[in-house]
Amino acid sequence: MALKQQLVQKQTQSLVMTQQLQQSLKILQLSAQELQDFVEQELQENPFLQREQAEGDDAAESSLSESSESNSDSDAHDMIQSDHTGEDNPLDANYENVWDAQENAAPETHSTDHYDGAESWGSGSVSGEYAYDMEQQLAPPLSLKDHVLEQITLDIQDPQKRIIALHLVDMLDENGYVHIEYDAITSRLECSYEDVDETLETLQHCDPTGVFARSLAECLKLQLQERGVFNPVLEILLDRLELVAARDYPVLAKLCGVTESDVAEYCSLLRTLNPRPGGDFATEVVQPLIPDVYVRRRNREWAVELNTETLPRVLVNREYYAEIKGRARSGEDKQYVSTQINSANWLTKALHQRAETLTKVAAAMVEQQRAFLEQGIYFLKPMTLAQIAEKVGVHESTVGRVTTNKYIATPRGIYEMKYFFASGLAASQNEEGVSSISVKHMIQEMIESETPDDILSDDKLASMLKIRGVDVARRTVAKYREGLGIPTSSERKRLKRN
Protein backbone atom coordinates (compact mmCIF):
# COMPACT_ATOMS: atom_id res chain seq x y z
CA MET A 1 0.00 0.00 0.00
CA ALA A 2 1.40 3.35 -1.05
CA LEU A 3 1.75 6.15 1.48
CA LYS A 4 0.34 9.56 0.60
CA GLN A 5 -0.15 12.93 2.24
CA GLN A 6 -3.46 14.76 2.44
CA LEU A 7 -5.07 17.66 4.29
CA VAL A 8 -7.99 16.82 6.58
CA GLN A 9 -10.20 19.24 8.51
CA LYS A 10 -11.32 18.05 11.93
CA GLN A 11 -13.52 19.94 14.40
CA THR A 12 -12.84 19.33 18.08
CA GLN A 13 -13.69 21.00 21.37
CA SER A 14 -11.08 21.74 24.00
CA LEU A 15 -10.79 23.93 27.06
CA VAL A 16 -8.22 26.65 26.57
CA MET A 17 -7.26 28.84 29.51
CA THR A 18 -6.29 32.33 28.48
CA GLN A 19 -3.44 34.07 30.23
CA GLN A 20 -5.86 36.37 32.04
CA LEU A 21 -7.95 33.43 33.26
CA GLN A 22 -4.84 31.75 34.57
CA GLN A 23 -3.84 34.93 36.39
CA SER A 24 -7.36 35.29 37.81
CA LEU A 25 -7.06 31.82 39.35
CA LYS A 26 -3.61 32.72 40.62
CA ILE A 27 -4.91 35.90 42.27
CA LEU A 28 -7.56 33.88 44.11
CA GLN A 29 -4.98 31.82 45.97
CA LEU A 30 -2.44 34.56 46.66
CA SER A 31 -1.94 35.51 50.28
CA ALA A 32 -2.44 39.12 51.34
CA GLN A 33 1.28 39.90 51.16
CA GLU A 34 1.72 38.12 47.83
CA LEU A 35 -1.24 40.03 46.43
CA GLN A 36 0.25 43.34 47.58
CA ASP A 37 3.53 42.47 45.84
CA PHE A 38 1.72 41.42 42.66
CA VAL A 39 -0.32 44.61 42.49
CA GLU A 40 2.76 46.71 43.23
CA GLN A 41 4.50 45.16 40.23
CA GLU A 42 1.45 45.84 38.05
CA LEU A 43 1.40 49.48 39.19
CA GLN A 44 5.00 49.87 38.10
CA GLU A 45 4.49 48.22 34.72
CA ASN A 46 1.06 49.52 33.70
CA PRO A 47 0.81 53.30 33.13
CA PHE A 48 -3.00 53.27 33.31
CA LEU A 49 -3.16 51.93 36.86
CA GLN A 50 -2.98 54.15 39.92
CA ARG A 51 -3.51 53.77 43.64
CA GLU A 52 -6.86 54.82 44.98
CA GLN A 53 -6.32 57.87 47.15
CA ALA A 54 -8.49 58.75 50.11
CA GLU A 55 -10.19 62.13 50.16
CA GLY A 56 -8.52 64.95 52.10
CA ASP A 57 -4.97 66.14 52.41
CA ASP A 58 -1.95 63.97 52.98
CA ALA A 59 -1.89 64.62 56.71
CA ALA A 60 -5.49 63.57 57.12
CA GLU A 61 -4.85 60.50 54.97
CA SER A 62 -1.81 59.56 57.04
CA SER A 63 -3.73 60.04 60.28
CA LEU A 64 -6.60 57.92 59.02
CA SER A 65 -4.24 55.19 57.90
CA GLU A 66 -2.42 55.10 61.24
CA SER A 67 -5.69 55.05 63.14
CA SER A 68 -7.04 52.24 60.97
CA GLU A 69 -3.88 50.20 61.37
CA SER A 70 -3.92 50.75 65.11
CA ASN A 71 -7.53 49.61 65.36
CA SER A 72 -6.86 46.63 63.13
CA ASP A 73 -3.81 45.59 65.14
CA SER A 74 -5.76 46.08 68.36
CA ASP A 75 -8.60 43.87 67.13
CA ALA A 76 -6.20 41.17 65.99
CA HIS A 77 -4.29 41.42 69.27
CA ASP A 78 -7.47 41.02 71.31
CA MET A 79 -8.44 37.96 69.30
CA ILE A 80 -5.19 36.03 69.40
CA GLN A 81 -3.28 37.29 72.44
CA SER A 82 -3.16 34.69 75.18
CA ASP A 83 -2.71 35.36 78.86
CA HIS A 84 0.94 34.35 78.66
CA THR A 85 3.00 37.03 80.34
CA GLY A 86 6.21 36.12 78.57
CA GLU A 87 8.13 35.55 81.80
CA ASP A 88 11.40 33.70 81.54
CA ASN A 89 11.37 29.99 82.19
CA PRO A 90 12.47 29.53 85.82
CA LEU A 91 14.57 26.56 84.70
CA ASP A 92 16.56 28.60 82.19
CA ALA A 93 19.45 28.75 84.65
CA ASN A 94 19.75 24.97 84.43
CA TYR A 95 20.67 25.25 80.74
CA GLU A 96 24.07 26.54 81.77
CA ASN A 97 24.50 24.81 85.14
CA VAL A 98 24.07 21.23 83.95
CA TRP A 99 26.50 21.51 81.07
CA ASP A 100 28.93 24.25 82.05
CA ALA A 101 30.00 22.31 85.13
CA GLN A 102 31.85 19.80 82.98
CA GLU A 103 35.48 20.11 82.03
CA ASN A 104 36.14 21.93 78.75
CA ALA A 105 32.58 23.18 78.85
CA ALA A 106 31.09 25.16 76.01
CA PRO A 107 31.35 28.96 76.36
CA GLU A 108 28.90 30.39 78.84
CA THR A 109 27.69 33.10 76.54
CA HIS A 110 25.19 31.86 73.98
CA SER A 111 23.68 33.95 71.26
CA THR A 112 19.92 34.23 71.39
CA ASP A 113 19.90 34.14 67.60
CA HIS A 114 21.76 30.88 67.17
CA TYR A 115 23.03 28.21 69.50
CA ASP A 116 26.78 28.05 68.94
CA GLY A 117 27.52 24.93 70.96
CA ALA A 118 26.61 22.53 68.19
CA GLU A 119 29.87 20.61 68.31
CA SER A 120 29.76 20.27 72.09
CA TRP A 121 26.21 18.93 72.12
CA GLY A 122 26.71 16.22 69.55
CA SER A 123 24.38 17.66 66.92
CA GLY A 124 26.79 16.76 64.17
CA SER A 125 26.61 20.20 62.57
CA VAL A 126 29.66 22.11 61.40
CA SER A 127 30.11 25.46 63.08
CA GLY A 128 32.80 28.07 63.27
CA GLU A 129 34.82 30.16 60.87
CA TYR A 130 34.99 27.57 58.09
CA ALA A 131 31.35 26.47 58.12
CA TYR A 132 29.59 26.92 54.79
CA ASP A 133 26.08 25.94 53.87
CA MET A 134 25.08 26.39 50.23
CA GLU A 135 21.35 26.14 51.02
CA GLN A 136 21.61 28.93 53.57
CA GLN A 137 23.28 31.10 50.97
CA LEU A 138 20.45 30.53 48.50
CA ALA A 139 17.40 30.62 50.78
CA PRO A 140 16.42 32.69 53.81
CA PRO A 141 16.91 30.95 57.17
CA LEU A 142 13.94 28.94 58.39
CA SER A 143 12.37 29.85 61.72
CA LEU A 144 11.44 27.21 64.26
CA LYS A 145 7.74 28.02 64.03
CA ASP A 146 7.73 27.70 60.24
CA HIS A 147 9.56 24.39 60.51
CA VAL A 148 7.00 23.07 63.00
CA LEU A 149 4.00 24.37 61.03
CA GLU A 150 5.17 22.42 57.97
CA GLN A 151 5.10 19.24 60.04
CA ILE A 152 1.70 20.01 61.55
CA THR A 153 0.22 20.41 58.07
CA LEU A 154 1.49 16.97 57.07
CA ASP A 155 1.17 15.01 60.33
CA ILE A 156 -2.00 16.30 62.01
CA GLN A 157 -5.16 15.68 60.01
CA ASP A 158 -7.61 16.14 62.88
CA PRO A 159 -8.96 19.73 62.50
CA GLN A 160 -9.57 20.05 66.24
CA LYS A 161 -6.02 19.03 67.07
CA ARG A 162 -4.73 21.41 64.41
CA ILE A 163 -6.55 24.33 66.00
CA ILE A 164 -5.14 23.49 69.45
CA ALA A 165 -1.71 22.93 67.89
CA LEU A 166 -1.73 26.42 66.34
CA HIS A 167 -2.27 27.95 69.78
CA LEU A 168 0.59 25.86 71.21
CA VAL A 169 2.92 26.90 68.39
CA ASP A 170 2.31 30.54 69.30
CA MET A 171 3.56 29.75 72.81
CA LEU A 172 6.96 28.40 71.67
CA ASP A 173 10.03 30.36 72.70
CA GLU A 174 13.22 30.65 70.68
CA ASN A 175 14.76 27.65 72.47
CA GLY A 176 11.91 25.34 71.52
CA TYR A 177 10.21 25.27 74.93
CA VAL A 178 6.48 25.81 75.29
CA HIS A 179 4.98 27.85 78.10
CA ILE A 180 1.41 26.59 78.16
CA GLU A 181 -1.40 28.71 79.52
CA TYR A 182 -3.97 25.96 79.91
CA ASP A 183 -6.72 28.27 81.12
CA ALA A 184 -6.25 30.60 78.13
CA ILE A 185 -6.57 27.75 75.61
CA THR A 186 -9.37 25.82 77.29
CA SER A 187 -11.48 28.93 77.89
CA ARG A 188 -11.04 30.22 74.35
CA LEU A 189 -11.68 26.91 72.60
CA GLU A 190 -13.89 25.42 75.34
CA CYS A 191 -11.89 22.21 75.25
CA SER A 192 -10.51 20.08 78.09
CA TYR A 193 -7.04 19.93 79.62
CA GLU A 194 -6.82 16.38 78.27
CA ASP A 195 -7.32 17.66 74.71
CA VAL A 196 -4.43 20.09 75.14
CA ASP A 197 -2.16 17.42 76.65
CA GLU A 198 -3.04 14.95 73.90
CA THR A 199 -2.19 17.50 71.21
CA LEU A 200 1.00 18.45 73.04
CA GLU A 201 2.08 14.81 73.11
CA THR A 202 1.66 14.66 69.34
CA LEU A 203 3.66 17.86 68.88
CA GLN A 204 6.49 16.52 71.04
CA HIS A 205 7.23 14.03 68.26
CA CYS A 206 8.10 16.88 65.91
CA ASP A 207 11.61 17.54 64.67
CA PRO A 208 13.95 18.59 66.24
CA THR A 209 13.52 16.18 69.13
CA GLY A 210 12.92 18.04 72.36
CA VAL A 211 10.69 20.82 71.04
CA PHE A 212 7.45 21.54 72.89
CA ALA A 213 9.04 20.48 76.17
CA ARG A 214 7.72 22.30 79.23
CA SER A 215 10.99 22.07 81.14
CA LEU A 216 14.64 21.23 80.68
CA ALA A 217 14.11 17.79 82.23
CA GLU A 218 11.27 17.01 79.81
CA CYS A 219 13.35 18.22 76.86
CA LEU A 220 16.17 15.84 77.75
CA LYS A 221 13.73 13.02 78.44
CA LEU A 222 12.24 13.33 74.94
CA GLN A 223 15.70 13.05 73.40
CA LEU A 224 16.57 10.03 75.53
CA GLN A 225 13.30 8.33 74.59
CA GLU A 226 13.95 9.03 70.92
CA ARG A 227 17.33 7.29 71.27
CA GLY A 228 15.67 4.39 73.08
CA VAL A 229 17.93 4.62 76.14
CA PHE A 230 15.64 6.16 78.75
CA ASN A 231 15.51 4.13 81.97
CA PRO A 232 14.65 4.59 85.69
CA VAL A 233 18.19 5.72 86.54
CA LEU A 234 18.07 8.51 83.99
CA GLU A 235 14.63 9.49 85.25
CA ILE A 236 16.07 9.99 88.75
CA LEU A 237 18.95 12.02 87.33
CA LEU A 238 16.54 14.27 85.44
CA ASP A 239 14.68 14.88 88.69
CA ARG A 240 17.99 15.91 90.32
CA LEU A 241 19.60 18.07 87.66
CA GLU A 242 21.02 20.38 90.32
CA LEU A 243 23.05 17.45 91.66
CA VAL A 244 24.14 16.54 88.13
CA ALA A 245 25.37 20.10 87.63
CA ALA A 246 27.24 19.94 90.96
CA ARG A 247 28.75 16.55 90.02
CA ASP A 248 27.60 15.12 93.34
CA TYR A 249 28.11 11.53 92.21
CA PRO A 250 28.07 9.92 95.68
CA VAL A 251 24.59 11.25 96.47
CA LEU A 252 23.32 10.42 92.99
CA ALA A 253 24.74 6.88 93.20
CA LYS A 254 22.89 6.33 96.48
CA LEU A 255 19.62 7.70 95.03
CA CYS A 256 19.89 5.60 91.87
CA GLY A 257 21.19 2.44 93.49
CA VAL A 258 24.16 2.19 91.13
CA THR A 259 27.91 2.80 91.35
CA GLU A 260 29.51 6.22 91.03
CA SER A 261 31.15 5.18 87.76
CA ASP A 262 27.73 4.31 86.37
CA VAL A 263 26.45 7.72 87.41
CA ALA A 264 29.40 9.36 85.69
CA GLU A 265 28.60 7.52 82.45
CA TYR A 266 24.94 8.51 82.63
CA CYS A 267 25.87 12.13 83.27
CA SER A 268 28.18 12.04 80.26
CA LEU A 269 25.25 10.76 78.21
CA LEU A 270 23.10 13.66 79.39
CA ARG A 271 25.74 16.13 78.26
CA THR A 272 25.54 14.82 74.68
CA LEU A 273 21.94 16.07 74.48
CA ASN A 274 20.84 19.44 73.21
CA PRO A 275 19.27 21.65 75.90
CA ARG A 276 18.13 24.16 73.27
CA PRO A 277 16.52 22.20 70.41
CA GLY A 278 15.25 25.40 68.80
CA GLY A 279 18.57 27.18 68.94
CA ASP A 280 19.73 26.12 65.47
CA PHE A 281 16.87 27.97 63.79
CA ALA A 282 16.72 31.60 62.84
CA THR A 283 15.27 33.95 65.42
CA GLU A 284 11.86 35.00 64.23
CA VAL A 285 10.88 38.63 64.37
CA VAL A 286 7.45 38.50 65.99
CA GLN A 287 4.90 40.22 63.80
CA PRO A 288 1.16 40.36 64.31
CA LEU A 289 -0.74 37.96 62.08
CA ILE A 290 -3.08 40.11 60.00
CA PRO A 291 -6.25 38.25 58.99
CA ASP A 292 -8.00 38.59 55.64
CA VAL A 293 -11.46 38.31 57.19
CA TYR A 294 -12.93 39.36 60.53
CA VAL A 295 -15.85 37.56 62.15
CA ARG A 296 -17.63 39.58 64.81
CA ARG A 297 -20.75 39.02 66.87
CA ARG A 298 -23.40 41.70 66.37
CA ASN A 299 -26.41 41.22 68.56
CA ARG A 300 -27.29 37.59 67.88
CA GLU A 301 -25.81 37.36 64.41
CA TRP A 302 -22.31 36.83 63.10
CA ALA A 303 -20.98 39.47 60.72
CA VAL A 304 -18.23 38.80 58.17
CA GLU A 305 -16.02 41.73 57.17
CA LEU A 306 -13.02 41.87 54.87
CA ASN A 307 -9.91 43.43 56.33
CA THR A 308 -9.60 46.47 54.07
CA GLU A 309 -5.98 46.97 55.13
CA THR A 310 -5.00 43.84 53.19
CA LEU A 311 -6.90 44.79 50.02
CA PRO A 312 -4.93 46.68 47.37
CA ARG A 313 -6.82 49.74 46.12
CA VAL A 314 -6.22 50.48 42.47
CA LEU A 315 -8.09 52.47 39.84
CA VAL A 316 -7.92 52.77 36.08
CA ASN A 317 -6.77 56.25 35.07
CA ARG A 318 -9.27 56.95 32.27
CA GLU A 319 -8.08 60.50 31.68
CA TYR A 320 -4.51 59.45 31.07
CA TYR A 321 -5.70 56.60 28.85
CA ALA A 322 -7.72 59.05 26.69
CA GLU A 323 -4.71 61.34 26.41
CA ILE A 324 -2.28 58.58 25.42
CA LYS A 325 -4.77 56.98 23.06
CA GLY A 326 -5.11 60.25 21.17
CA ARG A 327 -1.35 60.47 20.70
CA ALA A 328 -0.90 56.90 19.45
CA ARG A 329 -0.18 56.88 15.73
CA SER A 330 1.60 53.67 14.80
CA GLY A 331 0.01 50.24 14.96
CA GLU A 332 2.54 49.17 17.58
CA ASP A 333 1.63 52.10 19.86
CA LYS A 334 -2.09 51.43 19.48
CA GLN A 335 -1.54 47.75 20.28
CA TYR A 336 0.44 48.67 23.41
CA VAL A 337 -2.26 51.08 24.63
CA SER A 338 -5.01 48.53 23.98
CA THR A 339 -3.13 45.77 25.78
CA GLN A 340 -2.37 47.88 28.84
CA ILE A 341 -5.90 49.25 29.26
CA ASN A 342 -7.37 45.77 28.93
CA SER A 343 -4.90 44.51 31.53
CA ALA A 344 -5.79 47.38 33.88
CA ASN A 345 -9.52 46.72 33.49
CA TRP A 346 -9.00 43.03 34.06
CA LEU A 347 -6.96 43.58 37.24
CA THR A 348 -9.54 45.82 38.90
CA LYS A 349 -12.28 43.34 37.99
CA ALA A 350 -10.23 40.38 39.24
CA LEU A 351 -9.53 42.10 42.57
CA HIS A 352 -13.22 42.88 43.02
CA GLN A 353 -14.16 39.29 42.18
CA ARG A 354 -11.55 37.95 44.61
CA ALA A 355 -12.90 40.09 47.44
CA GLU A 356 -16.48 39.14 46.65
CA THR A 357 -15.72 35.41 46.48
CA LEU A 358 -13.68 35.53 49.68
CA THR A 359 -16.56 37.25 51.50
CA LYS A 360 -19.14 34.74 50.28
CA VAL A 361 -16.98 31.73 51.14
CA ALA A 362 -16.18 33.11 54.60
CA ALA A 363 -19.89 33.80 55.24
CA ALA A 364 -20.79 30.23 54.22
CA MET A 365 -18.09 28.84 56.49
CA VAL A 366 -19.27 30.94 59.43
CA GLU A 367 -22.82 29.76 58.88
CA GLN A 368 -21.64 26.14 58.91
CA GLN A 369 -19.39 26.60 61.96
CA ARG A 370 -21.72 28.77 64.02
CA ALA A 371 -21.92 26.16 66.78
CA PHE A 372 -18.12 26.12 67.04
CA LEU A 373 -18.02 29.90 67.38
CA GLU A 374 -20.70 29.91 70.06
CA GLN A 375 -20.03 26.70 72.00
CA GLY A 376 -16.44 25.61 71.42
CA ILE A 377 -14.25 23.09 69.68
CA TYR A 378 -16.44 20.05 70.43
CA PHE A 379 -19.08 21.50 68.12
CA LEU A 380 -16.89 21.75 65.03
CA LYS A 381 -19.14 20.74 62.14
CA PRO A 382 -18.16 18.63 59.13
CA MET A 383 -17.42 20.77 56.12
CA THR A 384 -16.22 19.97 52.61
CA LEU A 385 -15.14 22.10 49.69
CA ALA A 386 -18.07 20.82 47.64
CA GLN A 387 -20.53 21.75 50.38
CA ILE A 388 -19.32 25.36 50.59
CA ALA A 389 -19.04 25.57 46.80
CA GLU A 390 -22.69 24.61 46.47
CA LYS A 391 -23.74 27.32 48.93
CA VAL A 392 -21.66 29.99 47.22
CA GLY A 393 -22.43 28.88 43.67
CA VAL A 394 -18.85 28.28 42.50
CA HIS A 395 -16.69 25.26 41.67
CA GLU A 396 -15.11 23.50 44.63
CA SER A 397 -11.64 24.13 43.20
CA THR A 398 -12.42 27.84 43.52
CA VAL A 399 -13.20 27.36 47.22
CA GLY A 400 -9.92 25.47 47.57
CA ARG A 401 -7.99 28.34 46.03
CA VAL A 402 -9.73 31.11 47.94
CA THR A 403 -9.18 29.40 51.32
CA THR A 404 -5.47 28.79 50.71
CA ASN A 405 -3.15 31.19 52.54
CA LYS A 406 -6.15 33.15 53.87
CA TYR A 407 -6.70 33.76 57.55
CA ILE A 408 -9.96 34.33 59.39
CA ALA A 409 -10.11 36.09 62.76
CA THR A 410 -12.73 34.82 65.17
CA PRO A 411 -13.30 35.34 68.89
CA ARG A 412 -11.64 31.93 69.32
CA GLY A 413 -8.46 32.91 67.49
CA ILE A 414 -7.03 33.45 64.02
CA TYR A 415 -6.85 30.39 61.79
CA GLU A 416 -6.06 29.55 58.21
CA MET A 417 -9.42 29.01 56.53
CA LYS A 418 -8.54 25.59 55.16
CA TYR A 419 -8.19 24.17 58.70
CA PHE A 420 -11.97 24.11 59.09
CA PHE A 421 -12.57 21.46 56.46
CA ALA A 422 -13.13 18.05 58.04
CA SER A 423 -14.85 14.75 57.37
CA GLY A 424 -18.26 14.18 58.89
CA LEU A 425 -21.07 11.78 59.73
CA ALA A 426 -24.69 11.76 58.73
CA ALA A 427 -26.77 12.72 61.74
CA SER A 428 -30.22 11.60 62.73
CA GLN A 429 -33.30 13.04 61.14
CA ASN A 430 -33.75 16.80 61.46
CA GLU A 431 -30.24 17.20 62.82
CA GLU A 432 -27.20 18.77 61.22
CA GLY A 433 -24.07 16.77 60.54
CA VAL A 434 -21.63 16.19 63.38
CA SER A 435 -17.88 16.11 62.93
CA SER A 436 -16.37 12.63 63.20
CA ILE A 437 -13.81 14.11 65.58
CA SER A 438 -16.60 15.37 67.83
CA VAL A 439 -18.13 11.87 67.87
CA LYS A 440 -14.79 10.44 68.98
CA HIS A 441 -14.67 12.95 71.82
CA MET A 442 -18.20 11.95 72.87
CA ILE A 443 -17.26 8.25 72.89
CA GLN A 444 -14.12 8.95 74.90
CA GLU A 445 -16.02 11.03 77.47
CA MET A 446 -18.69 8.35 77.88
CA ILE A 447 -16.13 5.62 78.44
CA GLU A 448 -14.12 7.73 80.88
CA SER A 449 -17.25 8.32 82.97
CA GLU A 450 -18.30 4.65 83.14
CA THR A 451 -18.05 2.68 86.37
CA PRO A 452 -16.70 -0.87 86.92
CA ASP A 453 -20.28 -2.05 87.47
CA ASP A 454 -21.63 -0.38 84.34
CA ILE A 455 -19.22 -0.92 81.43
CA LEU A 456 -20.61 0.45 78.18
CA SER A 457 -20.71 -1.91 75.20
CA ASP A 458 -20.44 -0.62 71.64
CA ASP A 459 -24.20 -1.14 71.23
CA LYS A 460 -24.87 0.90 74.36
CA LEU A 461 -22.55 3.66 73.17
CA ALA A 462 -24.36 3.77 69.82
CA SER A 463 -27.70 4.08 71.63
CA MET A 464 -26.41 6.89 73.85
CA LEU A 465 -25.07 8.74 70.81
CA LYS A 466 -28.46 8.42 69.13
CA ILE A 467 -30.07 10.10 72.13
CA ARG A 468 -27.65 12.99 71.60
CA GLY A 469 -28.81 13.23 67.99
CA VAL A 470 -25.96 11.30 66.35
CA ASP A 471 -27.08 8.19 64.49
CA VAL A 472 -24.11 5.85 64.02
CA ALA A 473 -23.87 2.10 63.67
CA ARG A 474 -22.30 -0.15 66.28
CA ARG A 475 -19.47 -1.05 63.92
CA THR A 476 -18.71 2.67 63.45
CA VAL A 477 -18.52 3.10 67.22
CA ALA A 478 -16.16 0.11 67.40
CA LYS A 479 -13.98 1.59 64.67
CA TYR A 480 -13.70 4.95 66.43
CA ARG A 481 -13.08 3.28 69.79
CA GLU A 482 -10.24 1.22 68.33
CA GLY A 483 -8.84 4.35 66.68
CA LEU A 484 -8.72 5.99 70.11
CA GLY A 485 -6.81 2.99 71.48
CA ILE A 486 -9.62 2.05 73.91
CA PRO A 487 -10.02 -1.69 74.72
CA THR A 488 -13.28 -3.62 74.27
CA SER A 489 -15.95 -3.57 76.98
CA SER A 490 -14.93 -7.01 78.27
CA GLU A 491 -11.27 -5.99 78.51
CA ARG A 492 -12.16 -2.73 80.26
CA LYS A 493 -14.33 -4.61 82.74
CA ARG A 494 -11.45 -6.95 83.60
CA LEU A 495 -8.98 -4.07 83.90
CA LYS A 496 -11.20 -1.93 86.12
CA ARG A 497 -12.02 -4.81 88.46
CA ASN A 498 -8.33 -5.52 88.90
Image (cartoon, helix red, strand yellow):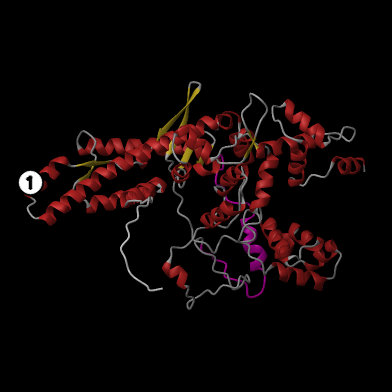
Using the image, determine if residue 316 lies above or below residue 243. Answer: above
User: Is 383 on the left or on the right of 141, as rendered?
Assistant: right
Of residues 482 and 106, the one drawn nearer to the viewer in this rendering: 482
Q: Residues within 10 Å of mark 1 (few under 14, many from 20)?
A: few
Q: Quadrant of residue 216?
A: bottom right
Place of residue 80 in the rendered image (x, y in percent of width and height, measured from the top left): 51, 39
The residue singled out by tag 1 in the image is: 326
Give the farthest residue toward the top: 299
Of residues 220 and 386, the one drawn nearer to the viewer in this rendering: 386
Residue 102 within the magenta-colored segment of the rendering: yes
Chain part drawn in magenta: 82-111
Place of residue 40 in the rendered image (x, y in percent of width and height, measured from the top left): 28, 50
Q: Quadrant of residue 395?
A: top left
Q: Main secondary structure of the magenta part?
A: loop
- At x 66% / y 25%, what residue is drawn? 429
Using the image, determine if residue 127 lies above or below residue 290. Answer: below
Q: The disc labelled 1 sits on which kind of residue?
A: Gly
- At x 81% / y 73%, what residue is drawn? 261
User: Is 113 on the left or on the right of 482, as rendered?
Assistant: left
Give the farthest residue toward the bottom: 130
Place of residue 319 in the rendered image (x, y in percent of width and height, measured from the top left): 13, 41
- At x 63% / y 34%, what residue is drawn? 190
Residue 274 within the magenta-colored segment of the rendering: no
Q: Quadrant of the N terminus?
A: bottom left
Quick one: SS at disc 1? Answer: helix
Place of residue 249 in the rendered image (x, y in percent of width and height, measured from the top left): 78, 68
Of residues 63 and 202, the one drawn nearer to the viewer in this rendering: 202
Residue 38 seen in this snapshot? yes
